[in-house]
Amino acid sequence: MMKNIRIVLINTSHPGNIGATARAMKTMGLNELYLVQPLNFPHPKAHEMASNAGDVVDQAIVVDSLEAAIGDARLVVGTSTRSRTIPWPMLTPREFAEKARVETLHSKVAILFGREQSGLTNEELHRCHFHIQIPSNPEYSSLNLAAAVQVIAYEICVASQNEVVTPQSVDWDYQWANAEQMEGFYEHLQRVLVALDFLKPEAPRQLMTRLRRLFHRARPDVMELNILRGILGAVEKNKK
Amino acid sequence: MMKNIRIVLINTSHPGNIGATARAMKTMGLNELYLVQPLNFPHPKAHEMASNAGDVVDQAIVVDSLEAAIGDARLVVGTSTRSRTIPWPMLTPREFAEKARVETLHSKVAILFGREQSGLTNEELHRCHFHIQIPSNPEYSSLNLAAAVQVIAYEICVASQNEVVTPQSVDWDYQWANAEQMEGFYEHLQRVLVALDFLKPEAPRQLMTRLRRLFHRARPDVMELNILRGILGAVEKNKK
Protein backbone atom coordinates (compact mmCIF):
# COMPACT_ATOMS: atom_id res chain seq x y z
CA MET A 1 0.00 0.00 0.00
CA MET A 2 2.62 2.50 1.14
CA LYS A 3 4.76 2.22 -2.01
CA ASN A 4 1.90 3.40 -4.20
CA ILE A 5 1.13 6.52 -2.23
CA ARG A 6 2.67 9.83 -3.19
CA ILE A 7 2.54 13.01 -1.16
CA VAL A 8 2.65 16.13 -3.36
CA LEU A 9 3.39 19.53 -1.80
CA ILE A 10 2.69 22.51 -4.03
CA ASN A 11 4.60 25.83 -3.77
CA THR A 12 5.64 25.25 -0.18
CA SER A 13 7.08 28.47 1.30
CA HIS A 14 8.90 27.23 4.38
CA PRO A 15 11.54 24.51 4.03
CA GLY A 16 10.92 23.57 7.68
CA ASN A 17 7.46 22.43 6.65
CA ILE A 18 8.95 20.15 4.01
CA GLY A 19 11.16 18.57 6.66
CA ALA A 20 8.29 18.23 9.13
CA THR A 21 6.20 16.65 6.37
CA ALA A 22 8.97 14.14 5.66
CA ARG A 23 9.01 13.20 9.34
CA ALA A 24 5.22 12.89 9.46
CA MET A 25 5.36 10.64 6.40
CA LYS A 26 8.15 8.40 7.59
CA THR A 27 6.61 7.81 11.01
CA MET A 28 3.58 6.45 9.19
CA GLY A 29 5.57 4.39 6.68
CA LEU A 30 5.30 6.70 3.65
CA ASN A 31 8.33 7.86 1.72
CA GLU A 32 7.42 9.15 -1.74
CA LEU A 33 7.48 12.95 -1.68
CA TYR A 34 7.08 15.24 -4.70
CA LEU A 35 7.62 18.99 -4.44
CA VAL A 36 6.05 21.20 -7.08
CA GLN A 37 8.03 24.43 -7.32
CA PRO A 38 8.99 24.77 -3.66
CA LEU A 39 9.97 28.37 -2.87
CA ASN A 40 13.04 27.59 -0.83
CA PHE A 41 14.50 24.14 -1.25
CA PRO A 42 16.92 22.49 -0.67
CA HIS A 43 17.52 24.20 2.67
CA PRO A 44 19.19 23.07 5.94
CA LYS A 45 15.98 23.84 7.82
CA ALA A 46 14.27 21.00 5.97
CA HIS A 47 16.74 18.48 7.33
CA GLU A 48 16.60 20.01 10.78
CA MET A 49 12.82 19.58 10.98
CA ALA A 50 12.96 16.13 9.40
CA SER A 51 14.84 14.75 12.40
CA ASN A 52 15.59 11.15 11.38
CA ALA A 53 13.58 11.35 8.20
CA GLY A 54 16.36 13.08 6.25
CA ASP A 55 16.30 10.23 3.73
CA VAL A 56 12.75 11.20 2.71
CA VAL A 57 13.91 14.78 2.18
CA ASP A 58 16.95 13.64 0.18
CA GLN A 59 14.83 11.45 -2.06
CA ALA A 60 12.14 14.11 -2.60
CA ILE A 61 11.55 14.80 -6.28
CA VAL A 62 11.31 18.45 -7.28
CA VAL A 63 9.20 19.13 -10.35
CA ASP A 64 8.11 22.18 -12.33
CA SER A 65 4.46 21.40 -12.83
CA LEU A 66 1.54 19.59 -11.27
CA GLU A 67 1.38 17.43 -14.41
CA ALA A 68 4.85 16.10 -13.73
CA ALA A 69 3.80 15.18 -10.19
CA ILE A 70 0.52 13.41 -10.95
CA GLY A 71 0.69 12.30 -14.59
CA ASP A 72 0.97 8.61 -13.77
CA ALA A 73 -1.44 8.65 -10.80
CA ARG A 74 -4.78 6.92 -11.31
CA LEU A 75 -6.38 8.42 -8.21
CA VAL A 76 -5.74 12.05 -7.33
CA VAL A 77 -7.12 13.68 -4.20
CA GLY A 78 -6.61 17.13 -2.70
CA THR A 79 -7.01 18.48 0.78
CA SER A 80 -9.32 21.44 1.12
CA THR A 81 -10.91 23.39 3.92
CA ARG A 82 -12.92 25.71 1.74
CA SER A 83 -16.30 24.73 0.46
CA ARG A 84 -16.34 25.14 -3.30
CA THR A 85 -18.74 27.10 -5.45
CA ILE A 86 -19.33 23.87 -7.36
CA PRO A 87 -19.58 20.94 -4.94
CA TRP A 88 -17.08 18.18 -5.55
CA PRO A 89 -17.10 14.58 -4.29
CA MET A 90 -15.80 14.68 -0.73
CA LEU A 91 -14.18 12.12 1.52
CA THR A 92 -13.23 12.20 5.15
CA PRO A 93 -9.61 11.19 5.80
CA ARG A 94 -10.88 7.83 7.03
CA GLU A 95 -13.01 7.17 3.98
CA PHE A 96 -10.10 8.17 1.79
CA ALA A 97 -7.69 5.85 3.58
CA GLU A 98 -10.01 2.92 3.09
CA LYS A 99 -10.33 3.77 -0.59
CA ALA A 100 -6.57 4.18 -0.90
CA ARG A 101 -6.00 0.77 0.62
CA VAL A 102 -7.93 -0.80 -2.23
CA GLU A 103 -6.65 1.49 -4.99
CA THR A 104 -3.00 1.02 -4.14
CA LEU A 105 -3.28 -2.67 -4.94
CA HIS A 106 -2.95 -1.73 -8.60
CA SER A 107 -2.57 2.05 -8.96
CA LYS A 108 -0.55 5.03 -7.89
CA VAL A 109 -2.44 7.41 -5.58
CA ALA A 110 -1.40 11.07 -5.30
CA ILE A 111 -2.44 13.34 -2.44
CA LEU A 112 -2.09 17.08 -3.03
CA PHE A 113 -1.37 19.62 -0.32
CA GLY A 114 -1.44 23.31 -1.13
CA ARG A 115 0.33 26.45 -0.05
CA GLU A 116 0.68 27.32 3.65
CA GLN A 117 -1.39 30.47 3.32
CA SER A 118 -3.82 29.79 0.52
CA GLY A 119 -4.02 26.03 0.01
CA LEU A 120 -4.82 24.63 -3.42
CA THR A 121 -6.14 26.74 -6.29
CA ASN A 122 -9.49 25.94 -7.87
CA GLU A 123 -7.67 24.69 -10.95
CA GLU A 124 -5.62 22.28 -8.83
CA LEU A 125 -8.71 21.13 -6.96
CA HIS A 126 -10.44 20.44 -10.26
CA ARG A 127 -7.69 17.96 -11.12
CA CYS A 128 -8.82 15.78 -8.21
CA HIS A 129 -11.22 12.88 -8.11
CA PHE A 130 -12.07 13.66 -4.52
CA HIS A 131 -11.48 16.40 -2.03
CA ILE A 132 -10.54 15.45 1.50
CA GLN A 133 -11.74 17.59 4.33
CA ILE A 134 -10.10 17.03 7.71
CA PRO A 135 -12.70 17.34 10.48
CA SER A 136 -11.86 20.44 12.46
CA ASN A 137 -12.99 23.31 14.61
CA PRO A 138 -15.25 25.46 12.42
CA GLU A 139 -13.85 28.55 14.09
CA TYR A 140 -10.22 27.68 13.39
CA SER A 141 -9.62 24.97 10.86
CA SER A 142 -6.15 25.94 9.69
CA LEU A 143 -3.91 22.96 10.36
CA ASN A 144 -0.20 23.40 9.89
CA LEU A 145 0.86 21.78 6.59
CA ALA A 146 2.85 18.94 8.19
CA ALA A 147 0.05 18.40 10.73
CA ALA A 148 -2.43 17.89 7.88
CA VAL A 149 -0.04 15.42 6.27
CA GLN A 150 0.30 13.69 9.64
CA VAL A 151 -3.45 13.18 9.99
CA ILE A 152 -3.87 11.80 6.48
CA ALA A 153 -0.77 9.60 6.77
CA TYR A 154 -2.00 8.34 10.15
CA GLU A 155 -5.31 7.24 8.64
CA ILE A 156 -3.43 5.53 5.82
CA CYS A 157 -1.26 3.75 8.37
CA VAL A 158 -4.32 2.58 10.30
CA ALA A 159 -6.04 1.43 7.11
CA SER A 160 -2.93 -0.45 6.00
CA GLN A 161 -3.28 -2.63 9.07
CA ASN A 162 -6.78 -3.56 7.99
CA GLU A 163 -6.95 -6.92 6.31
CA VAL A 164 -10.46 -6.80 4.93
CA VAL A 165 -10.70 -7.21 1.18
CA THR A 166 -13.53 -5.31 -0.43
CA PRO A 167 -15.20 -6.24 -3.71
CA GLN A 168 -13.99 -3.05 -5.45
CA SER A 169 -10.48 -4.40 -5.38
CA VAL A 170 -11.04 -7.28 -7.74
CA ASP A 171 -11.60 -8.06 -11.37
CA TRP A 172 -12.12 -4.75 -13.14
CA ASP A 173 -11.32 -5.40 -16.77
CA TYR A 174 -9.06 -2.43 -17.52
CA GLN A 175 -6.85 -0.07 -15.54
CA TRP A 176 -8.14 3.36 -14.61
CA ALA A 177 -6.95 6.11 -16.89
CA ASN A 178 -4.10 8.12 -15.42
CA ALA A 179 -4.07 11.89 -14.98
CA GLU A 180 -2.18 12.50 -18.22
CA GLN A 181 -4.69 10.48 -20.21
CA MET A 182 -7.55 12.32 -18.54
CA GLU A 183 -6.04 15.70 -19.48
CA GLY A 184 -5.64 14.54 -23.07
CA PHE A 185 -9.33 13.66 -23.10
CA TYR A 186 -10.41 17.00 -21.63
CA GLU A 187 -8.36 18.88 -24.20
CA HIS A 188 -9.89 16.88 -27.01
CA LEU A 189 -13.39 17.34 -25.59
CA GLN A 190 -12.91 21.09 -25.26
CA ARG A 191 -11.63 21.33 -28.84
CA VAL A 192 -14.69 19.52 -30.15
CA LEU A 193 -17.13 21.55 -28.06
CA VAL A 194 -15.62 24.78 -29.36
CA ALA A 195 -15.80 23.46 -32.94
CA LEU A 196 -19.48 22.64 -32.35
CA ASP A 197 -19.99 26.16 -31.06
CA PHE A 198 -21.39 24.57 -27.90
CA LEU A 199 -18.58 26.00 -25.79
CA LYS A 200 -18.03 29.67 -26.45
CA PRO A 201 -14.49 30.62 -25.46
CA GLU A 202 -15.59 34.18 -24.70
CA ALA A 203 -18.27 32.90 -22.28
CA PRO A 204 -17.11 29.49 -21.05
CA ARG A 205 -19.13 29.69 -17.81
CA GLN A 206 -18.47 26.56 -15.82
CA LEU A 207 -19.05 24.11 -18.63
CA MET A 208 -15.61 22.47 -18.62
CA THR A 209 -15.53 22.43 -14.84
CA ARG A 210 -18.85 20.61 -14.71
CA LEU A 211 -17.75 18.10 -17.36
CA ARG A 212 -14.46 17.62 -15.55
CA ARG A 213 -16.29 16.92 -12.31
CA LEU A 214 -18.63 14.47 -14.04
CA PHE A 215 -15.94 12.44 -15.80
CA HIS A 216 -13.59 12.54 -12.86
CA ARG A 217 -16.39 11.14 -10.75
CA ALA A 218 -16.95 8.36 -13.25
CA ARG A 219 -13.23 7.57 -13.31
CA PRO A 220 -13.03 6.05 -16.77
CA ASP A 221 -10.83 3.04 -17.33
CA VAL A 222 -8.50 3.13 -20.34
CA MET A 223 -10.96 1.25 -22.57
CA GLU A 224 -13.79 3.63 -21.71
CA LEU A 225 -11.52 6.58 -22.37
CA ASN A 226 -10.66 5.09 -25.77
CA ILE A 227 -14.36 4.88 -26.55
CA LEU A 228 -14.92 8.50 -25.54
CA ARG A 229 -11.97 9.66 -27.64
CA GLY A 230 -13.29 7.55 -30.50
CA ILE A 231 -16.66 9.29 -30.28
CA LEU A 232 -14.96 12.70 -30.30
CA GLY A 233 -12.98 11.66 -33.37
CA ALA A 234 -16.16 10.52 -35.14
CA VAL A 235 -17.82 13.84 -34.34
CA GLU A 236 -14.88 15.72 -35.86
CA LYS A 237 -14.91 13.57 -38.98
CA ASN A 238 -18.63 14.06 -39.51
CA LYS A 239 -18.74 17.76 -38.85
CA LYS A 240 -20.05 19.88 -41.71
CA MET B 1 -16.74 16.83 25.33
CA MET B 2 -13.98 19.29 24.43
CA LYS B 3 -14.26 21.30 27.65
CA ASN B 4 -13.43 18.24 29.72
CA ILE B 5 -10.27 17.32 27.89
CA ARG B 6 -6.89 18.57 29.05
CA ILE B 7 -3.62 18.29 27.20
CA VAL B 8 -0.61 18.05 29.55
CA LEU B 9 2.93 18.59 28.23
CA ILE B 10 5.74 17.57 30.55
CA ASN B 11 9.19 19.22 30.54
CA THR B 12 8.90 20.46 26.99
CA SER B 13 12.29 21.71 25.73
CA HIS B 14 11.33 23.75 22.68
CA PRO B 15 8.80 26.57 23.04
CA GLY B 16 7.99 26.20 19.34
CA ASN B 17 6.54 22.77 20.15
CA ILE B 18 4.26 24.35 22.74
CA GLY B 19 2.96 26.78 20.14
CA ALA B 20 2.55 24.06 17.52
CA THR B 21 0.68 21.98 20.10
CA ALA B 22 -1.65 24.90 20.81
CA ARG B 23 -2.40 25.18 17.11
CA ALA B 24 -3.00 21.43 16.80
CA MET B 25 -5.38 21.61 19.76
CA LYS B 26 -7.35 24.61 18.59
CA THR B 27 -7.88 23.27 15.08
CA MET B 28 -9.56 20.28 16.69
CA GLY B 29 -11.61 22.30 19.18
CA LEU B 30 -9.47 21.73 22.28
CA ASN B 31 -8.17 24.59 24.40
CA GLU B 32 -7.12 23.44 27.86
CA LEU B 33 -3.34 23.20 27.97
CA TYR B 34 -1.22 22.49 31.09
CA LEU B 35 2.56 22.76 31.05
CA VAL B 36 4.52 20.89 33.69
CA GLN B 37 7.88 22.60 34.18
CA PRO B 38 8.49 23.71 30.60
CA LEU B 39 12.19 24.44 30.03
CA ASN B 40 11.76 27.65 28.09
CA PHE B 41 8.40 29.35 28.44
CA PRO B 42 6.95 31.92 27.89
CA HIS B 43 8.85 32.53 24.66
CA PRO B 44 8.03 34.40 21.42
CA LYS B 45 8.66 31.22 19.42
CA ALA B 46 5.61 29.66 21.08
CA HIS B 47 3.35 32.37 19.72
CA GLU B 48 5.02 32.26 16.35
CA MET B 49 4.32 28.55 15.94
CA ALA B 50 0.82 28.89 17.38
CA SER B 51 -0.27 31.00 14.41
CA ASN B 52 -3.85 31.98 15.27
CA ALA B 53 -3.96 29.81 18.40
CA GLY B 54 -2.13 32.36 20.53
CA ASP B 55 -5.09 32.42 22.91
CA VAL B 56 -4.45 28.78 23.81
CA VAL B 57 -0.82 29.62 24.56
CA ASP B 58 -1.82 32.65 26.62
CA GLN B 59 -4.28 30.63 28.67
CA ALA B 60 -1.88 27.72 29.19
CA ILE B 61 -1.40 26.92 32.87
CA VAL B 62 2.15 26.36 34.03
CA VAL B 63 2.53 24.04 37.03
CA ASP B 64 5.37 22.62 39.07
CA SER B 65 4.32 19.05 39.34
CA LEU B 66 2.39 16.34 37.55
CA GLU B 67 0.03 16.22 40.56
CA ALA B 68 -1.01 19.80 39.98
CA ALA B 69 -1.79 19.01 36.36
CA ILE B 70 -3.84 15.87 36.81
CA GLY B 71 -5.19 16.01 40.37
CA ASP B 72 -8.79 16.64 39.34
CA ALA B 73 -8.78 14.29 36.34
CA ARG B 74 -10.82 11.10 36.59
CA LEU B 75 -9.23 9.50 33.59
CA VAL B 76 -5.52 9.89 32.89
CA VAL B 77 -3.84 8.50 29.82
CA GLY B 78 -0.29 8.79 28.53
CA THR B 79 1.18 8.46 25.06
CA SER B 80 3.96 5.98 24.70
CA THR B 81 5.88 4.42 21.86
CA ARG B 82 7.92 2.09 24.00
CA SER B 83 6.54 -1.22 25.01
CA ARG B 84 6.79 -1.46 28.76
CA THR B 85 8.50 -4.12 30.78
CA ILE B 86 5.28 -4.40 32.74
CA PRO B 87 2.37 -4.59 30.33
CA TRP B 88 -0.17 -1.82 30.84
CA PRO B 89 -3.70 -1.49 29.50
CA MET B 90 -3.33 -0.08 26.02
CA LEU B 91 -5.67 1.83 23.74
CA THR B 92 -5.34 2.92 20.16
CA PRO B 93 -6.04 6.63 19.61
CA ARG B 94 -9.42 5.66 18.17
CA GLU B 95 -10.38 3.46 21.12
CA PHE B 96 -9.28 6.20 23.47
CA ALA B 97 -11.34 8.84 21.69
CA GLU B 98 -14.45 6.71 21.94
CA LYS B 99 -13.81 6.17 25.64
CA ALA B 100 -13.14 9.88 26.14
CA ARG B 101 -16.43 10.75 24.49
CA VAL B 102 -18.23 8.83 27.21
CA GLU B 103 -15.96 9.82 30.11
CA THR B 104 -16.13 13.53 29.39
CA LEU B 105 -19.88 13.51 29.98
CA HIS B 106 -19.08 13.60 33.68
CA SER B 107 -15.30 13.70 34.18
CA LYS B 108 -12.15 15.56 33.36
CA VAL B 109 -9.81 13.57 31.11
CA ALA B 110 -6.07 14.35 31.04
CA ILE B 111 -3.72 13.25 28.27
CA LEU B 112 0.00 13.28 29.04
CA PHE B 113 2.71 13.93 26.49
CA GLY B 114 6.36 13.52 27.47
CA ARG B 115 9.70 15.08 26.59
CA GLU B 116 10.77 15.53 22.98
CA GLN B 117 13.73 13.19 23.38
CA SER B 118 12.71 10.69 26.02
CA GLY B 119 8.93 10.75 26.33
CA LEU B 120 7.30 9.93 29.65
CA THR B 121 9.18 8.33 32.52
CA ASN B 122 8.05 5.00 33.89
CA GLU B 123 6.79 6.78 36.98
CA GLU B 124 4.65 9.11 34.88
CA LEU B 125 3.36 6.24 32.78
CA HIS B 126 2.36 4.43 35.95
CA ARG B 127 0.06 7.34 36.80
CA CYS B 128 -2.03 6.53 33.80
CA HIS B 129 -5.14 4.39 33.48
CA PHE B 130 -4.24 3.56 29.93
CA HIS B 131 -1.36 4.02 27.57
CA ILE B 132 -2.08 5.19 24.06
CA GLN B 133 0.10 3.93 21.29
CA ILE B 134 -0.16 5.75 17.97
CA PRO B 135 0.09 3.27 15.09
CA SER B 136 3.35 3.94 13.29
CA ASN B 137 6.24 2.68 11.22
CA PRO B 138 8.09 0.16 13.44
CA GLU B 139 11.37 1.40 11.97
CA TYR B 140 10.74 5.05 12.81
CA SER B 141 7.97 5.75 15.24
CA SER B 142 9.14 9.08 16.62
CA LEU B 143 6.36 11.57 15.93
CA ASN B 144 7.06 15.21 16.59
CA LEU B 145 5.39 16.26 19.85
CA ALA B 146 2.78 18.52 18.22
CA ALA B 147 2.16 15.89 15.53
CA ALA B 148 1.32 13.35 18.23
CA VAL B 149 -1.04 15.85 19.84
CA GLN B 150 -2.57 16.48 16.40
CA VAL B 151 -3.35 12.79 15.86
CA ILE B 152 -4.94 12.32 19.29
CA ALA B 153 -6.87 15.59 19.03
CA TYR B 154 -8.06 14.62 15.56
CA GLU B 155 -9.47 11.34 16.86
CA ILE B 156 -11.19 13.24 19.65
CA CYS B 157 -12.67 15.66 17.14
CA VAL B 158 -13.94 12.80 14.98
CA ALA B 159 -15.44 11.04 18.00
CA SER B 160 -17.14 14.24 19.11
CA GLN B 161 -19.00 14.35 15.81
CA ASN B 162 -20.64 11.05 16.61
CA GLU B 163 -23.33 11.71 14.09
CA VAL B 164 -21.88 10.44 10.85
CA VAL B 165 -22.23 12.78 7.94
CA THR B 166 -21.68 11.24 4.54
CA PRO B 167 -20.25 13.82 2.15
CA GLN B 168 -22.32 12.68 -0.84
CA SER B 169 -25.56 13.29 0.99
CA VAL B 170 -25.10 16.99 1.54
CA ASP B 171 -25.19 20.18 -0.43
CA TRP B 172 -24.95 18.92 -3.97
CA ASP B 173 -26.20 21.67 -6.23
CA TYR B 174 -28.66 19.63 -8.35
CA GLN B 175 -30.65 16.46 -7.88
CA TRP B 176 -29.37 13.21 -9.32
CA ALA B 177 -30.98 12.33 -12.62
CA ASN B 178 -33.71 9.74 -12.28
CA ALA B 179 -33.85 6.45 -14.16
CA GLU B 180 -36.24 7.79 -16.79
CA GLN B 181 -33.93 10.72 -17.52
CA MET B 182 -30.96 8.37 -17.73
CA GLU B 183 -32.78 6.15 -20.23
CA GLY B 184 -33.69 9.19 -22.31
CA PHE B 185 -30.02 10.11 -22.38
CA TYR B 186 -28.87 6.62 -23.40
CA GLU B 187 -31.42 6.52 -26.22
CA HIS B 188 -30.26 9.90 -27.47
CA LEU B 189 -26.61 8.88 -27.20
CA GLN B 190 -27.24 5.66 -29.11
CA ARG B 191 -29.10 7.53 -31.88
CA VAL B 192 -26.19 9.94 -32.30
CA LEU B 193 -23.56 7.19 -32.26
CA VAL B 194 -25.42 5.32 -34.99
CA ALA B 195 -25.74 8.51 -37.04
CA LEU B 196 -21.99 9.03 -36.68
CA ASP B 197 -21.46 5.46 -37.85
CA PHE B 198 -19.51 4.91 -34.64
CA LEU B 199 -22.01 2.36 -33.39
CA LYS B 200 -22.87 -0.21 -36.05
CA PRO B 201 -26.27 -1.76 -35.28
CA GLU B 202 -25.23 -4.99 -37.00
CA ALA B 203 -22.14 -5.26 -34.76
CA PRO B 204 -22.86 -3.34 -31.57
CA ARG B 205 -20.38 -5.31 -29.44
CA GLN B 206 -20.50 -4.01 -25.87
CA LEU B 207 -20.29 -0.34 -26.71
CA MET B 208 -23.57 0.79 -25.16
CA THR B 209 -23.02 -1.49 -22.19
CA ARG B 210 -19.66 0.10 -21.49
CA LEU B 211 -21.05 3.62 -21.87
CA ARG B 212 -23.96 2.73 -19.64
CA ARG B 213 -21.62 1.42 -16.98
CA LEU B 214 -19.47 4.55 -17.23
CA PHE B 215 -22.29 7.09 -16.95
CA HIS B 216 -24.15 5.12 -14.34
CA ARG B 217 -21.02 5.07 -12.28
CA ALA B 218 -20.74 8.85 -12.56
CA ARG B 219 -24.39 9.30 -11.53
CA PRO B 220 -25.00 12.57 -13.35
CA ASP B 221 -27.12 15.23 -11.71
CA VAL B 222 -29.87 16.83 -13.80
CA MET B 223 -27.70 19.80 -14.81
CA GLU B 224 -24.90 17.53 -15.96
CA LEU B 225 -27.39 15.44 -17.90
CA ASN B 226 -28.72 18.62 -19.56
CA ILE B 227 -25.18 19.47 -20.64
CA LEU B 228 -24.65 16.00 -22.08
CA ARG B 229 -27.96 16.17 -23.97
CA GLY B 230 -27.00 19.65 -25.17
CA ILE B 231 -23.74 18.30 -26.58
CA LEU B 232 -25.59 15.50 -28.37
CA GLY B 233 -27.98 18.07 -29.84
CA ALA B 234 -25.06 20.20 -31.05
CA VAL B 235 -23.49 17.16 -32.68
CA GLU B 236 -26.73 16.40 -34.55
CA LYS B 237 -27.08 19.98 -35.71
CA ASN B 238 -23.51 20.10 -37.00
CA LYS B 239 -23.51 16.75 -38.74
CA LYS B 240 -22.82 16.87 -42.45
Image: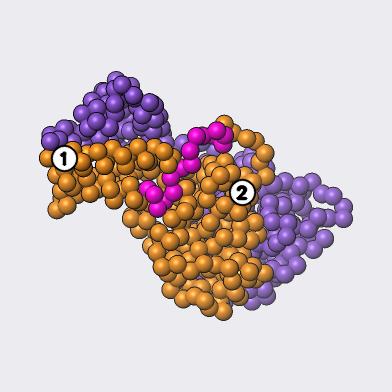
Chain colours: A orange, B purple
Pointer 2 and pointer 1 on the same chain: yes
Tell me, yes or no, whether the two marked residues, 2 and 1, touch with CB atoms within 8 Å: no
Q: Amino acid at mark 2?
A: Met
Residue toward you, A37 or A18: A37
**Left or right for B1, reference A87:** right
Mark 1 or mark 2, which is nearer the start of the sequence? 2
Q: Residue most toward the right?
A: B86
Q: Residue most toward the front?
A: B202
**Left or right for B234, reference A184:** left
Compared with residue A190, is residue B228 higher up or lower down, i.e. above or below? above
Q: Amino acid at mark 1?
A: Lys
Residue A12 shows in this picture: no
Where does the image place residue A11, in percent across and percent down from the top left?
42, 67
Where does the image place residue A93, in percent across and percent down from the top left?
52, 47
Where does the image place residue B1, in percent across and percent down from the top left?
57, 45
Compared with residue A100, is residue B220 higher up or lower down, i.e. above or below? above
Secondary-structure class at tag 2: loop
Instruction: Residue A1: give its label.
Output: 2
Q: Which residue carries the number 1 mark?
A: A239
Q: Residue at x 21, y 42 (%)?
A: A236
What chain does badge 2 belong to? A
Residue B80 shows in this picture: yes
